[in-house]
Image (cartoon, rainbow, N blue to C red):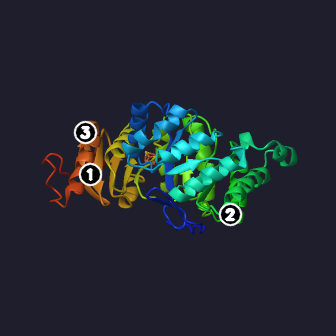
Amino acid sequence: MTSIPRKNTRQVKIGPVTVGGGAPVRIQSMTTTHTRDVDATVDQIQQLTEAGCEIVRVACPTEADARSLGKIKSRIKIPLVADIHFNYRFALIALDEGVDKLRLNPGNIGKKDRTVEIVEKAKKMRVPIRIGVNGGSLEKDLMEKFGPTPEALVESAKRHVAILEELDFHDIIISLKASDVPTMVASYRLASQIFDYPLHLGVTEAGTLLRGSIYNAIGIGTLLQEGIGDTIRVSLTAESVEEIKVGKMILEALGLRKGVRVISCPSCGRAEVDVFKLANEVESRAMAQIKDPMTISVLGCVVNGPGEAHESDFGVTGGKDKGMIYIDGKQRRVVDEAKLVDELFKEIETRRKGPSDPDQNSSPSEKSSSSQIYEQ
Ligand code: SF4
């Protein structure tokens, strides 16, 4: 796969995780629980971590939420970000509770001395701040001057950045989210010409699982393909874990992350196995069980099956009520359709445990000549 040159940005550390400056593009999400419900929030963060989330953000709309951050942080393994909107006290509490990053727009805090207090404390504690500009909440004068345009979003970001830079604070990450994909893409392109701070990419209010995944993939994917973006948050009206799955797939599609990829055909009149069922089963088991990068191909017949299998670590190709399992492009054995997924995963598990005799897992009846499957 052709590799994409990345725009060089400053490196910012969120706890132990680096963002920008050549670090891998990080995947993040946000919890949907009330943050003050510590058990529920920690449970959700653990699920996100298991799915591959590298940074997690929690909302802090009340003092009780902000005061729960330390307890949450002590029970999770990934950096914790406090999302603060206007209340400067909650930002100070969040810092005292040990958060790894604040999401806060300094221009929204009000009196200057309050902003100074937060920024000085964050600087001392080496806690970065993400400026999160959103197309839905732009300053009135910018809306009047520019309308909801990339220029307005970037101008708003410049104002917030200027406040931090004036206080000699540079651990900054910037996002400029819009629900309209072309506006979002143009805003980040413009921002990447102006700032060298890492960019957090996202399409805001992108929608439900299918629509939102497509909108995010186009918006985030277009920018990543141009080398723009250092961390991503796929925003979906769905379980937060889905955001991580989609984020990982976007990065994998662009070759920015290696993961488990299931290549599957769309099926057609030539298929003699249920390709949809087979591919869905393989994908959900692979996503749940396999952590190592690998490619698994699932094809309905011999037209493209052997060719794709040749390029994959593992493969299955359908025949009449049966399937051929491939390993490293080589035919391994024929299995009844009903047992195909189980047998494929046994092969994967055997491989992960170490090298073995190629015929060790095949019963004599399963060993086949290479053409057996296609002669049914
Ligand atoms: S691999 Fe076979 S079943 Fe799948 S789409 Fe191609 S021709 Fe059809």
Residue 147 marker: none
Left or right of residue 304, residue 108 in this image: right
Residue type at numbered disc 1: Ile
Where is residue 336 drawn, in percent x and y?
Answer: 25, 40
Please tell me which residue is depicted at 16% across the width and 51% down the height of the picture. Answer: 361
Please tell me which residue is depicted at 57% across the width and 40% down the height of the picture. Answer: 90
Is residue 22 among what the camera can see? yes
Instruction: Check the picture and name the quadrant holding the C terminus.
Output: top left
Residues marked 3 and 2 touching at CB (< 8 Å): no
Left or right of residue 211, residue 187 in this image: right
Where is residue 200 drawn, in percent x and y?
Answer: 59, 53
* Closer to the eye: label 1 or 3: 1
Residue type at numbered disc 2: Phe
Out of 45 and 356, give the one closest to the viewer. 45
The residue carrying mark 3 is: 339
Residues marked 1 and 2 touching at CB (< 8 Å): no
Is residue 235 among what the camera can see? no
Q: Earlier in the sequence, mark 1 or mark 3?
A: 3
* Closer to the eye: label 3 or 2: 2
In which quarter of the view is residue 147 placed?
Answer: top right
Out of 66 and 280, give the one closest to the viewer. 66
Please tell me which residue is depicted at 40% across the width and 37% down the height of the picture. Answer: 42
Please tell me which residue is depicted at 23% across the width and 50% down the height of the picture. Answer: 349
Q: CA separation, marks 1 and 2?
A: 46 Å
Residue type at numbered disc 3: Lys
Q: CA separation, marks 1 and 3?
A: 14 Å
The residue carrying mark 1 is: 348
The residue carrying mark 2 is: 195
Where is residue 319 drawn, in percent x and y?
Answer: 33, 44
Out of 231 and 284, give the one closest to the viewer. 231
